[in-house]
Amino acid sequence: MSKSYYNDADLDKFGNIAEWNKALADKFFSYYGDVFKAGALSVREKSLIALAVSHALQCPYCIHAYTTDSLKQGADEEQMMEAVHVAAAIKGGSALVHGVQMMNKAKEISM
Amino acid sequence: MAGEIKEKKTSLKYRAHELSSVDVQKRILSDSESIGISPFAKSLKTAGLFPLSPLHTEIFQVNVGKMCNQVCKHCHVDAGPDRKEIMSKETMQQCLDALRNSKIRKVDLTGGAPEMNPEFRWFVEELSALGMHIMVRCNLTIILAHPKYHDLPEFFKKHKVEVISSLPYFAARRTDAQRGEGVFEKSIEALKMLNAVGYGIDPELQLNLVYNPSGAFLPGSQADLEFEFKTKLGEGWGIEFNQLYAITNLPVSRFLEYLVVSENYADYMQQLAVAFNPTAAAGVMCRNTISVGWDGYLYDCDFNQMLEMKVASKIQHVSEFNTEALESRMILINQHCYGCTAGAGSSCGGAVA
């Protein structure tokens, strides 16, 4: 048993989730594949969105996968770091905007 | 922590690096088991393509020498200014004789920097006189390297040479990281000189660029990358070109060094093997190309040439060239071949599938 919660090699085993429920895994992977095909957004744009979301979720598997994929799709370092800042801005903003809720509550219970 | 290759100004051979030995390289490449990939031969068998055999030979690729003005980190030739192996005029004459007696009409000149061979212009003139379609793999910076090369665009134009040039990215950082400090700026300057004489604009003067990843990852869609390159190079510098070829880096010589030192070898090979595409395998360039080394020996491709895997034929030298006899050979393979069969495939002309 690995002593780390996250193991690099596990990313390649993602497909193994089908072993315990093939029907749902098949549906998920089929959907997943379709989501990342070029559509109204290009493959590169989707990869950069996935990279940003990966950081918001702080998912090591996703960061590994979408750093590699962004480079493969021709994104550069500047674009990738900007995507991470978008994630950081939304995460920071989502904390800070709750400051309004705090202010509302504080005012409500204060003289 | 993975190691990092500091800026290297010399070839593996000059540094007497362990990987300058083709036996060491072949030993690493032969071991598919320890990196958990299926042997390439087995993948070919599954695709019904083993043993891999040639189709009609259409392209005569000549490596006129390993001498180069650049020392790119990913170079599979291990080329550089310290390499002295270049093709003699006598061997070039043997190439011309071979072509005169064959149906091949396309000649692909590569190196090193092919223009550094003192007989390069004579060879191009003779090939042109034979009516060959000539391709030159020009690294761009050579045009600016010395005043004697400044007129190369005019010389290429005179013989309607198709110019194929490496430009790993449309921005300086990633280009320079792979090819050396200042290479991007010089490449842009050289592209402007080629545009100025009509290259990339006049349909008879083809200028094609080669994209290859600056690291241990595969190239993405060739069409998407071409669109991006055309937009960025056009808007940024007013540069025009015809096609972009997306080429996968093969684990040979200095790219193999990079993979081993950065501890990316196993992961990269797994990426290549997982992406094995039978359609790309059926269209690999070794099936319609013959590769000639600087000393006249024949190979299935430029990569096999660098691994010193001479063709499996009784004819092994250009002086005894015979298309029919060579087309009955079996193409030699090893795990590096996964580089040409991954995803959309990879050849000297880009994607194949």
Image (cartoon, coloured by chain):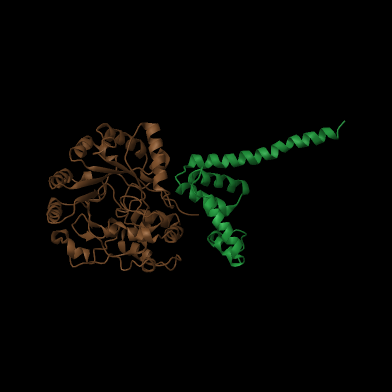
In the rendered view, tell whether residue A24 sits above or below residue B137. below
From the viewer's perspective, is residue A58 above or below residue B338? above
Left/right of residue B40 with respect to residue A90 in the rendered view: left
Residue name at image x 26 percent, y 35 percent: B202
Left or right, residue A106 beside residue B275: right
Which residue is found at the position 49% from the left and 44% from the top? A42
Which quadrant of the structure image shows residue A93?
Answer: top right
Relative image position of residue B43 (x, y in whole percent):
39, 66
- At which x and y percent is residue A24? 61, 61
Q: Residue furthest right?
A: A111
- Residue B177 appears in the rendering: no
Q: Colour of chain A?
A: green
Q: Is residue B237 visible?
A: yes
Q: Residue at x 12, y 53 (%)?
A: B100
Left or right? Give the position of A63 relative to B173: right
Q: Position of residue A5 (x, y in %)?
A: 62, 59
Along the line of sight, the residue nearer the viewer: A76 or B228: B228
* Palette colour of chain B: brown
The one of B133 and A71 positioned closer to us in this rendering: B133
Counting labels gives 0
Whole-percent x and y of residue B277? 40, 59
Q: In the image, is residue A41 above or below residue A12?
A: above
Please determine whether, in this image, residue B118 is positioned above or below residue B271. above
